[in-house]
Each structure stands twice: as structure tokens, then as C-alpha cells.
Image: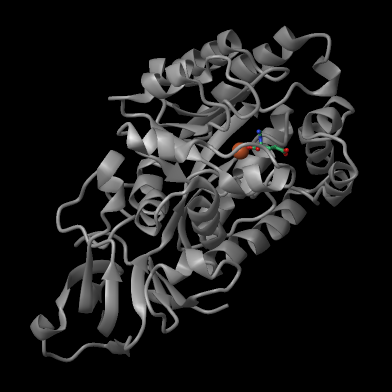
Amino acid sequence: MATLFKNIKELIQVRTESIPFVSGKAMDELPTIKNAFLLVEDGLISDFGKMEDCPKKDFSEVIDATGKMILPSWCDSHTHIVYAGNREGEFIDRIKGLSYEAIAANGGGILNSAKKLQETSEEVLYQQSKVRLEEVIQLGTGAIEIKSGYGLTLDSELKMLRVIKRLKKHYPIAIKATFLGAHAVPLVYKENKQGYLKLVIDEMLPKIAEDNLAEFIDVFCETNYFSVGETELILEAAKTYGLIPKIHVNQFTAIGGVQVGVKHHALSVDHLEEMRNEDIETLKNTNTMPVALPGCSYFLNIPYTPARKMIDVGLPLALATDYNPGSAPSGNMNFVVSIACIKMKMTPEEAINAVTINGAYAMGLEDKVGSITKGKQANLILTKPINSYGVIPYAFGTNQIEKVYLGGKGICA
Ligand code: NIG
Ligand code: FE
């Protein structure tokens, strides 16, 4: 089965050699080919180049992309899309003046979602979650990380992770699962945090490893959630099961989360709304990808990650949605690209690199997705006719996607 895309106005994010990620000044370079062809065989990118070099033989399918562009699908390296119900009541409370922290302190927030999830059957949870996955696929996401962390009991954390596993099985999109048992301390452990840590480390982790339910370990390393010391304990325990850290740090306060992440060779440290100079310094010359979640800053009205400062000192940056019911109820990566340009002063080139190749790296998928490279999965976005790729962030709120392809197959809405 061979599909040829021909007359592509611009083929974007073309990398002849597979690279792990781009940092600093290189983030502003987005290699493209104008008037291009792209050949897909057996679900993989097998060839691409200028139209004048387009192979002339019979293909099972030929798609004429005149006036349209092709990009690799978005790589969303940080989401919580498996959740039950939503929290628009808290949204209204925040409009009326309550802070996210105050709502959480009154039993809302993560604990509110945990209560809903515990009361929801695995089947209903799957049905609700698959709607979100299908929605983000149509919005151009072709690889996604999904976290647990709204269960907060052994049974409910396992339920969430089994739902992620089922999504993996049924959808042709790369999915990575992360265990986030240390997302919040459940009410019953309010006076016994040690007891909850013991549950996470001695009961949840071994069972999750035994059932092979997660690749990554996450902790909400934050004031009033989990301290640096507690984060370290969990990362050390998870390491014995081969789980790689990807952690929530510096969302509201900078308490040393970046340092603990780097020390434990985290694949990524995510959020980073509150960055001290020393946090930026710590990230230099490491393999840890900083991940910004501008949808969360937008929704909670908290600072944006200082992307300009970080990229200008040579760091890489990935962008993700954080799609969750409390702090970012949107999985729209196109919007993420847009607010990164508008609010974080990233160029369209930097933002597109951040949601493709760098996002792929932040999930350990840089060999499979994130660029137009021979041998990578043909997870693609075909745009509507557009003037330039800058229109994607510029025309915020307008969908520029005509069709998405996963493994070279067009996905119908
Ligand atoms: O990434 N900060 C921790 N976790 C989520 C929000 C959780 C929630 O409010 O439900 C986040 O922002
Ligand atoms: Fe998150």
C-alpha cells in the first residue's frame, strides 16, 4: 500500500537525519521543502523531496495537495485526558474570585476529580476518555502521553491505567502511559501523608510494574502537594521498576523540583511557570526536556513559562496541552502553538519545533514521530489551503486542518 501526496505547497519539519531535539537558536530553524511530494508505504514515510524528483509509477492512492501544507502531527507530551466528569463549577468560582489553590484547599481540585473518578465505572471512564482522544486526533495530535493521578487509590489508579491501555489498543496513535499516584494526598490520608507515600511506593508501584501499565513516573512536586524529598523517594522507588521520571514542577512555587528532576535524569520537567535563574542554569547541558503548558497559564491566569529567556540561553523547549479538567480543559495543540507565539513571544518556527520534534523527545518517541524523516510513522496534518504556516498561530481559534493521517491512513471525524 503506497500513498503519494503530490504538489504539496510546503512540506514542513523535514529532517533528513533523525535528530533527538532542537535547542536554543536552532529552535528558530524549521526546515521545509516547497512544491514537494511525500510518499508513504506501509504506514511509514518512505520518501519525500521536490516535485521535480517525484517518482513516476502507479500508487494505490494519490492525493493532490495543491495550495495545502503537510506537517508531522502534533506530539502532546503532557495530558490527563482520562478523567471523569468535569469541573466547570470551580471555573465559575474562579471567575468570582477564588484561587485555584483556595479551591483545592476546600476539597475541590484534584480531590474533586478523584471522587468523581472513583465513583465512575471503568467502562464509562473509557467512553468519556475516548471522546477526548478522538477530539484531539481530529485537532492534529498524532502522539500523546496520558497520566493517571485522579484515582488516588490502588483500584482507581489501576482503573485509569487500564483505560489508557485500552485506548492504546484501539486507536492508531502512539500513546505513552504515566503513573501519577503522587498527584495529591487523598482526604483519608490528610493526617497521614507517610501512609499514602507507602501505598504509592509499596503497593501501587509494584502492581503497576507487574501489569506493565506505565512507562513513566510523575509526581506533583509542589508546595502543599509533594516535597522535593518525597518526590525523590518516589523517583528512586520507581527507578527500580524501570519507570522514567517526567514530573510536574515549578507550577506555583519554585522549591527545587527542576533540580530533583535533573538529578534523577527526568526525561522532562513540566509546567515551569515559576522559574528562578538557578532553575534555568540547572537545565543547561542536560538531557531533560523543559515542557511549557501555556493552556494552563491561560486558563488559570498564572505566569507563562519564560520561554524567551530559556531559549535565548540555549535551552530546548517542548509545548504540550496539559489537557485536564481543572487547569487546562483543552487538548487543542493548535491553540497551544498560537498562545506560545502570542503570549510567550516564540516564533512560529520555535513553536512548531516545540510541538513536534521536541514533544516527541519528551515522550521518548523521537525515533518514531515528530518530523518528516524516512522510516518515521506517517502521522501527518494536511492543512486547508493557507498562505504560510504562520497562519496556524496567527489565526487563533480557526481550524486550519483539512485532514489528519495516522500511519498514512486518513482519519475521518
Ligand atoms: O498539570 N498540577 C497538577 N496537575 C494538573 C492539574 C490537576 C487538576 O487541577 O485537576 C496540572 O495542572
Ligand atoms: Fe499536568
- Compared to residue 103, the image places residue 367 above or below, namely below
Quarter holding ligand 1: top right
Residue 361 against residue 157 in the figure, above or below: below
The percent coordinates of residue 28 (x first, y second) are 30, 51
Q: Is residue 14 found left or right of 77 in the rendered image? A: left
Measuring from the top left, give residue 75's x and y in whole percent: 43, 53
Q: Identify which residue, 342 or 224, lies in the foreground.
A: 342
Q: Is 139 placed above or below 292 here? A: below
Based on the displayed image, in which of its 4 quarters is residue 110 positioned?
Answer: top right
Q: Which residue is drawn at 56% across and 60% down?
A: 335
Horizontally, residue 178 falls left or right of residue 298, namely left
- From what the image shows, is residue 372 above or below residue 108? below
Provide residue 6's location: percent of width, then percent of height: 25, 85
Q: Nearer the viewer, residue 182 or 292?
A: 292
Question: Residue 168: x and y, percent?
Answer: 51, 54
Please indicate whether residue 34 sits to the left or right of residue 299 in the image. left
Whether residue 1 is visible to the viewer of this picture, yes or no, is no
| Residue drawn where x is 31% and y is 29% of the image | 287
Task: Give the residue displayed 29% in from the left and 81% down from the top.
Answer: 9
Which quadrant is the C terminus positioned in? bottom right
Q: Which residue is rendered at x = 73% and y = 29% of the image?
A: 152
